[in-house]
Image (tube, rainbow, N blue to C red):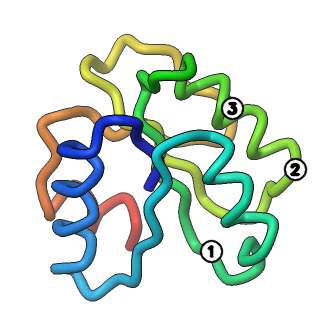
Amino acid sequence: MVDSDPYRRTFLVQMLMETGRRVLMAGSGTEARGILSHLATRVDAVIVSSSLAEGSGADLVRALRSEWPAPRFLLVANQPSEAVPDGAVQLVRPITRDKLQALLG
């Protein structure tokens, strides 16, 4: 889970953990790259907030997918109209456990 806002990041991580998933948190693209460089083969999904302190979440998804195409990428957006990179799925706020289950399987 990549989000520069600690409140949003913690909220979503708790929700993911309630569904029985193990979750790693990153507050930036740099942290996410560090995690993926060590664990990419064991990461099922990467969830990225559309707005990060360092820039666009969509840009981060594109960059991460170019290096690690295997994980599923979800882009958390405030509105359905936000641009979604190829190969990513949009998760529109408000986020519920049912939405997460449907997208992550």
Question: Could you tell me which secondary element the residue under label 2 belongs to?
Answer: helix
Horizontal side of 21 relative to 63 (left or right) equals left
Q: CA distance from mark 1 to mark 3?
A: 19 Å
Q: Given the current orientation, which residue lies at the most extreme bottom position?
A: 20
**Amino acid type of the residue tagged 3 in the rendering:** Asp
Q: Within the image, what quadrant is residue 58 found in?
A: top right
Quadrant where the C terminus is found in the figure:
bottom left
The residue lying furthest to the top in this view is 81
If you read the primary sequence from the N terminus, does the residue marked by circle 2 or circle 1 appear first? 1
Looking at the rendered structure, the secondary structure element under dot 1 is loop
- Residue 67 place in picture, x, y as percent: 87, 50
CB contact under 8 Å: marks 1 and 3: no
Residue under circle 3? 86
Point 17% across, 66% down: residue: 15
Q: Amino acid at mark 1?
A: Val
Amino acid carrying label 2: it is Glu
- 39 versus 35 height, above or below: below
Label 1 vs label 3, nearer the camera: 1
104 or 23: nearer the eye?
A: 23
Cα–Cα span, label 2 and label 1: 13 Å
Residues tagged 2 and 3 counted as in contact (Cβ below 8 A): no
Assess whether mark 1 and mark 2 are in contact (beta carbons under 8 angstroms).
no
Up/down of 56 relative to 99, above or below: above
Q: Is residue 76 above or below residue 10?
A: above
Label ID, residue 67: 2
Q: Residue at x 23, y 57 (%)?
A: 10
Pointer 1: what residue? 43
